[in-house]
Image (cartoon, rainbow, N blue to C red):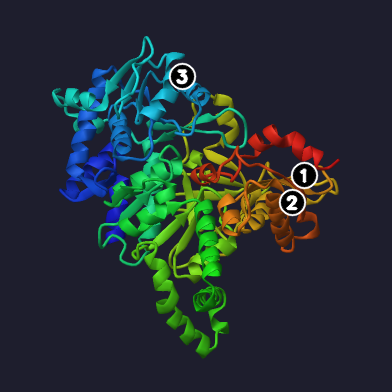
């Protein structure tokens, strides 16, 4: 009955604002959004009714600034309650949210403003505002609503208004925003999310209300298999950028549909502390986070040594066997494995708050060994798959049948088809409305209602999707052999000393690589990270170890080190390729080619 009720909720939803307002009525005065008060060092909450009031007042305030249906409003902010409030308020007017990444340069911002035609922007901090103002001044975006107080007067011609002032202005206006929002259609575009994909200039993906609602329905259906899902108010810890479609759907609108609480993490550097404080029940993240956690756990165990290290290794070995081949375990191994639940696994789980029902992994391929590491420690990781063009989730593993080598079966109401050349095609309400201002790109990506993903894959006997490669990223060496760069990069990145890797070698005799070292791991091993020779030797040793797991044609012969251009933090915060391939080739192509001379 619970699943049928949830499905009906999404089927009956007129649009995203209506989904939110209906859920706010249902949840009454329960807590909804949480953020850390830095001065008091305590978490403070906003209730569902408080958020609903702010959404309606901000919508009226935005309308007073001239925002109307169809207008694009740029949103530049880190994850915080105001992000959600602004997003839904914009949509209430029939306007379109245009998220801009906090990591964008002024040039990036200018492209998004000019391409989208946004004339109003909402910006959170003074630091983000100062980087954004030059772009606004060079464009037709002449109104900025600043959540925090600016440190400088705006450039001439720019109007910067205070967030609270706009809310207060809206509070004085008599208008039934909620009733008006009911006129929005599910097929209407509600946001434009810019994604660079694998090529140059970022393109704006137009997503409809219905596309995101379809995603939420599918996610709810899949996670309903979790123990006690929905029997208590679920708790999400949001840390991936809301400007990405993954967190926008899975970390914002899905929690809304599930009536959950959302805590906004303070940042990557405080993520583990926040996990212990918040005790989330569900968390979405990208593979880099899991790789990072795995590396830290193994390094700490190696440092500690003795019985603790031995017990952890036993838990990993027996936990992996219990997942892969439970019938092969002897009675003694089964009993010892149960004992390890208390001695090891519960302690590890406590570091993540102790209530976690599932980690959901998406945005990039999850290495099998990394997923198995968490499963062996009693932490459920459900790998999924999708693209911004599909709002974004297409498939996800099920709790009752979690197949780590796959990305799970299609979500409910989603169709997956494999083309003759192996390309994965997606159909359903989740598909984008197209690329903003780019009919040619839209026509090449969407044909007869199917999104052509550019990914190669197959469906197994259970209908679970297996991704084998990117259609355009397959490397064909000079000997005519086809190589999967994702497989090689995944194995290399399992080495603690390596944070990021991109292999290179199309039409060349062998592979070379661009490597970003994990300087934290190197420091913990006593290596002076300012000593180039020492760092180089450590990376060389790590690649030698990784090469032992690779076939002859997959082995990496030489490498270049990238120390500053692509930080580990940016890689973790970008649910896409670990290093954007085209950017690396553009900036380091000559150095990579020089390795062949």
**Relative to 516, is 591 above or below?**
above
441 relative to 1 in the view: left or right: right
Disc 3/disc 1 C-alpha distance (Å) = 38 Å
Callout 3 crowding tier (Cα within 10 Å): few <14, some 14–19, many ≥20:
many
Q: Quadrant of the C terminus?
A: top right
**Relative to 191, is 153 above or below?**
above
The disc, 3 or 1, on the residue closer to the chain's N-terminal end is 3
291 relative to 536 in the view: left or right: left
Horizontal and vertical percent position of residue 447: 57, 36
Residue tagged 3: 135
Residue tagged 2: 483
Mark 2 falls on what kind of element? strand
Horizontal and vertical percent position of residue 194: 49, 32
Q: Nearer the viewer, residue 30 or 459?
A: 30
The disc, 2 or 1, on the residue closer to the chain's N-terminal end is 2
The residue at 55%/37% (across/down) is 448
Mark 3 falls on what kind of element? helix
Residue tagged 1: 505
**Camera sees residue 188:** yes
For the image shown, how many numbered marks are present on the structure?
A: 3
The residue at 85%/49% (across/down) is 479
The residue at 40%/17% (across/down) is 141
The residue at 80%/59% (across/down) is 552
**Relative to 508, is 403 above or below?**
below
């Amino acid at each position: 009955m619970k699943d049928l009720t949830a499905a009906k909720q999404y089927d009956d939803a007129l649009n995203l604002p209506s989904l939110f307002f209906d859920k706010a009525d249902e949840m009454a005065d329960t807590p909804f959004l949480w953020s850390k008060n830095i001065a008091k060092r305590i978490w403070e909450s906003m209730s569902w009714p408080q958020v609903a009031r702010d959404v309606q007042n901000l919508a009226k305030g935005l309308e007073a600034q001239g925002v109307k249906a169809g207008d694009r409003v740029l949103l530049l902010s880190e994850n915080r309650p105001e992000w959600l409030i602004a997003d839904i308020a914009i949509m209430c007017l029939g306007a379109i949210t245009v998220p801009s990444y906090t990591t964008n340069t002024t040039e990036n911002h200018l492209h998004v403003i000019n391409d989208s035609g946004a004339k109003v922007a909402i910006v959170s901090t003074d630091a983000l505002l100062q980087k954004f103002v030059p772009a606004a001044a060079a464009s037709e975006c002449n109104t900025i609503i600043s959540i925090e107080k600016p440190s400088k007067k705006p450039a001439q011609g720019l109007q910067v208004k205070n967030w609270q002032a706009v809310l207060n202005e809206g509070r004085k206006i008599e208008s039934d925003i909620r009733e008006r929002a009911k006129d929005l259609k599910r097929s209407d575009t509600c946001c434009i999310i810019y994604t660079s994909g694998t090529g140059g200039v970022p393109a704006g993906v137009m997503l409809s209300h219905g596309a995101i609602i379809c995603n939420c329905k599918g996610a709810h259906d899949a996670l309903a298999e979790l123990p006690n899902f929905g029997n208590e108010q679920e708790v999400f810890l949001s840390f991936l950028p809301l400007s990405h479609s993954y967190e926008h759907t899975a970390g914002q609108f899905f929690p809304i549909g599930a009536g959950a609480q959302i805590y906004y993490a303070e940042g990557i550097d405080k993520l583990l502390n926040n996990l212990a404080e918040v005790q989330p029940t569900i968390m979405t993240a990208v593979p880099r986070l899991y790789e990072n956690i795995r590396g830290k756990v193994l390094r700490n165990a190696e440092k500690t040594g003795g019985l603790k290290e031995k017990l952890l290794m036993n838990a990993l070995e027996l936990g992996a066997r219990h997942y892969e081949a439970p019938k092969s375990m002897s009675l003694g191994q089964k009993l010892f494995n149960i004992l390890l639940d208390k001695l090891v696994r519960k302690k590890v789980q406590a570091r993540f708050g102790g209530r976690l029902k599932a980690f959901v992994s998406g945005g990039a391929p999850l290495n099998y060994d990394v997923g198995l590491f968490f499963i062996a420690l009693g932490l459920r990781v459900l790998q999924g798959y999708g693209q911004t063009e599909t709002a974004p989730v297409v498939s996800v593993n099920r709790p009752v049948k979690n197949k780590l080598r796959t990305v799970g079966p299609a979500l409910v109401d989603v169709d997956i088809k494999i083309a003759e050349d192996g390309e994965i095609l997606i159909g359903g309400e989740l598909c984008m409305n197209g690329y903003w201002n780019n009919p040619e790109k839209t026509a090449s990506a969407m044909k007869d209602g199917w999104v052509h993903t550019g990914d190669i894959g197959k469906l197994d006997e259970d209908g679970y999707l297996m991704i084998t490669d990117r259609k355009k990223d397959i490397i064909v060496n000079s000997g005519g052999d086809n190589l999967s760069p994702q497989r090689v990069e995944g194995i290399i990145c399992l080495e603690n000393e390596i944070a990021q890797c991109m292999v290179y070698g199309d039409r060349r005799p062998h592979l070379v690589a661009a490597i970003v070292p994990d300087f934290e791991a190197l420091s913990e091993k006593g290596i002076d990270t300012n000593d180039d020779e020492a760092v180089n030797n450590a990376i060389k040793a790590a690649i030698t170890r990784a090469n032992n797991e690779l076939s002859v044609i997959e082995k990496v012969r030489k490498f270049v080190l990238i120390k500053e251009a692509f930080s580990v933090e940016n890689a973790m915060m970008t649910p896409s390729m670990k290093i954007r391939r085209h950017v690396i080739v553009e900036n380091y192509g000559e150095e990579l080619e020089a390795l062949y001379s």
